[in-house]
Image (cartoon, grey):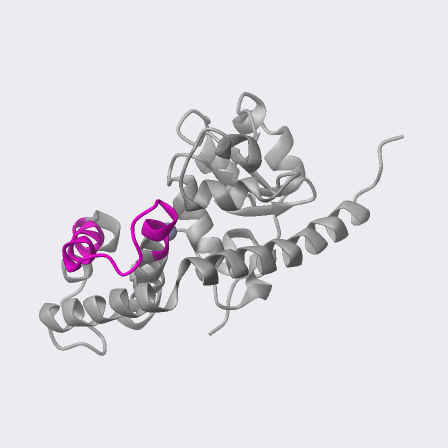
Amino acid sequence: MGYIHKVCNEDFLFNHLAFQKAELIDGNTWAQNKNNLCAELLRSEDPGLFLFYDCIATRNVGEAWAHGVGTYSPTSRGLVMPSDFPSIEHEIAHFLEMGNIERLKFCDMGMDSDPGKWYERGPSILFIGFSRELRTRQIQKILEGEIEGGPNCKLAKSMNDLTTNQSWHPDQQFSDFGKFKSAKEVEDYMIDLCNKVRQNWTQEKIRFEFKRRCAFMREHVGSLQSERPVAA
Ligand SMILES: [Zn+2]
């Protein structure tokens, strides 16, 4: 499936009013006072590769997005993401989940970040996005410190989060379930997917993938730095 080769408009991101008051905190600094797997990963990146901003406090963030700034933005200064909406653990989970590592070079990892558009494209695209989000949330729970292969009640809670979330609720948006015949089939599929992610994403695999992806993106960030004119 194709993806969007959207490159971040860095001048807009760093200079526009929307970000003037927003402090960018590097991931390593954020992680100093936290104690979970996500913090451990971010502390291992020194100097920090990730830069986070307080999305809720940032005014006109929608306008920034409309001007070529992503929720996830690879820039010559690092990988810029929100810290609070969604959480850092969620954003790092997306960074780990994305199967095609090349997509980490693009804003929003090549995803269309406008929820309205997912629904316009119909059930098959919706379920691709939906499955990605579900996998991401399972990885997120491991990053937040939940025990691997946790009890099914945790899986159920996670699914419940997803199915009751307005923008992800499939049967609220569609009477057509695409390849599924009913809401029950969707639920069975989700349980199966959750279990597979839990089995596959061990803490060891997470540490390995994080390191591999950071090395890959440090090189990309370095290439963006050399492309930018140096101030006289
Ligand atoms: Zn997400």
Q: Quadrant of residue 185?
A: bottom left
Q: Quadrant of residue 88?
A: top left
x and y percentages locating residue 180 in the rendered image: 18, 76
Camera sees residue 121? no
Numbered circles on residues, count: 0
Residue drawn 60% across the image and 36% down it: 13
Residue drawn 46% across the image and 74% down it: 1
Whether 34 is among the magenta residues is no
Q: Is residue 141 left or right of residue 205?
A: left
Viewer-closest of 121 and 183: 183
Camera sees residue 92? yes
Q: Is residue 189 left or right of residue 224?
A: left
Q: Is residue 66 left or right of residue 175?
A: right
Q: In this view, does 8 lie above or below 62?
A: below
Image quadrant in which the C terminus is located: top right
Q: In the orientation shown, which residue stands out farthest toward the top?
A: 21
x and y percentages locating residue 53 in the rendered image: 50, 32
Residue drawn 38% across the image and 37% down it: 85
x and y percentages locating residue 109 in the rendered image: 51, 57
Q: In the orientation shown, which residue stands out farthest toward the right?
A: 232
Magenta residues, as a range?
139-164
Q: Is residue 17 left or right of residue 151?
A: right
x and y percentages locating residue 76 in the rendered image: 70, 44
The dominant secondary structure in magenta is helix
